Amino acid sequence: MPVTSQLSPTERSTIRRGSERARTEREELHAVLDAGLICHLGVVVDGAPRVLPTGYGRSGDTLYLHGSTGARSLREAAGEPEICVTVTHLDGIVYARSAFHFSVNYRSAVIHGRPRQVTDPDEKWRALQVITDHLAPGSWEHARQPTKRELAATAVIALDLTEAAVKMRGGGPNDDPEDVEADKAWAGVLPLETRWGAPEPSDDLAPEFGIPAHVLERRYPA
Amino acid sequence: MPVTSQLSPTERSTIRRGSERARTEREELHAVLDAGLICHLGVVVDGAPRVLPTGYGRSGDTLYLHGSTGARSLREAAGEPEICVTVTHLDGIVYARSAFHFSVNYRSAVIHGRPRQVTDPDEKWRALQVITDHLAPGSWEHARQPTKRELAATAVIALDLTEAAVKMRGGGPNDDPEDVEADKAWAGVLPLETRWGAPEPSDDLAPEFGIPAHVLERRYPA
């Protein structure tokens, strides 16, 4: 890996609020990204921010994003000197004795960097494999792979995971001692759980086409 | 309501890609926002985008965001001429016969606007009620409400829901006819389901303190 295991110490990626929640290990950045399904891509357009949900995949310390070559968001992202990509997992709501101390348990990764348009056909091919298998593991091998025309119609950008901030919160509320003593309100965590539902075969699929293992046995996350 | 039921027709909030997925009714914007728990707030800092997960609440056609007065993101958002707030629900992964046609089912709302710092104590009080009851319905009445000091330590910004784009995708894959005919790969939707887990009382809560109905009977979404 060309980067160190420590995440970036630049000004904007140094977490000031709740610094005890900051995680500096690269492995934790990878874990947050690998457990996510979509990211929120931030670009600046005419001086104003624009935030759009987008698919992605990770290969080592490179994040790949893709979209149609006709989509404005990716064209704009590719032309921008800087983008921001954020992946957030909401794990639960923290109920406190006081409204002031309500919070959420979460894991988030915020990545800043200059995007690179992927034009090399081999890298683009690998990037699409990474993105497809991130969204739907096992599908690159199972499904028909892209034609040259499809490859040309897909825009891919790469973002180095050099400058990133990982933040997490877990556990119960941090109530004031007087409120704990008063014993007037419930306090604790209501966990949020995400799981896969039963696969829904396409209407135009042959009825005898069984659900393949990579769909049926998919676990969350992964 | 001071705004029309039609969402903004401005240049940047007019959806070009997949315009059949655009929803123009204000009620659908409200539904996407009300079903969400956190948003992704985009601000421009030193010319670069920054995207951070943030809590919010809606009152009519005003969105409220809050944070500590010490938090950079909200200070920066309040000082910015423009921010972007995006709420996304991921409903499932769309498996297609070709990698090119893989997609996701989702609902998203993207709001652009100039934030307004909420300084009037009455509006700030109501905004905190809205945000608290969005994150944890019933909790504003159940928990201790803010003191003057806590109110002063909380920054609240308001964003009018005037300029917004709602986008949704549902249903199965849009495969090419040749791939449907070839019948070589599974196609369908793997739904993603989110639900509340069992409430976890705080370690320092009196053991006899029962879990109140607004926690125990909370449904998702709501």
Image: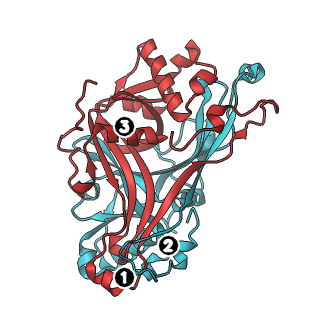
Chain colours: A red, B cyan
Q: Position of residue B155 (x, y in %)?
A: 28, 67
State the SS at label 2.
loop
**Type of amino acid at the residue the image marks with label 2:** Pro
Q: Chain of mark 2?
A: B
Camera sees residue B123:
no
| Labels 2 and 1 in the same subunit | yes
- Viewer-proximal residue, A195 or A152? A195
Q: Position of residue B117 (x, y in %)?
A: 29, 65
In the image, which is nearer the foreground, mark 2 or mark 3?
Answer: 3
Q: Which image quadrant: the C terminus of chain B?
A: bottom right
| Disc number placed over residue A9 in the picture, else none | none
| Disc number placed over residue A30 in the picture, else none | 3
* Residue beneath disc 2: B137
Q: Residues within 10 Å of mark 2 (few under 14, many from 20)?
A: some
Say left or right for A221 vs B82.
Answer: right
Say left or right for B130 vs B104.
Answer: left
**Type of amino acid at the residue the image marks with label 3:** His
* Residue beneath disc 1: B144
The quadrant holding residue A156 is top left
- Viewer-proximal residue, B161 or B180? B180
Looking at this view, name the residue that lies furthest to the right: A207
Q: Position of residue B79 (x, y in %)?
A: 24, 56
- Tell me: residue A31, above or below residue A128: below
**Type of amino acid at the residue the image marks with label 1:** Arg
Q: Earlier in the sequence, mark 2 or mark 1?
A: 2
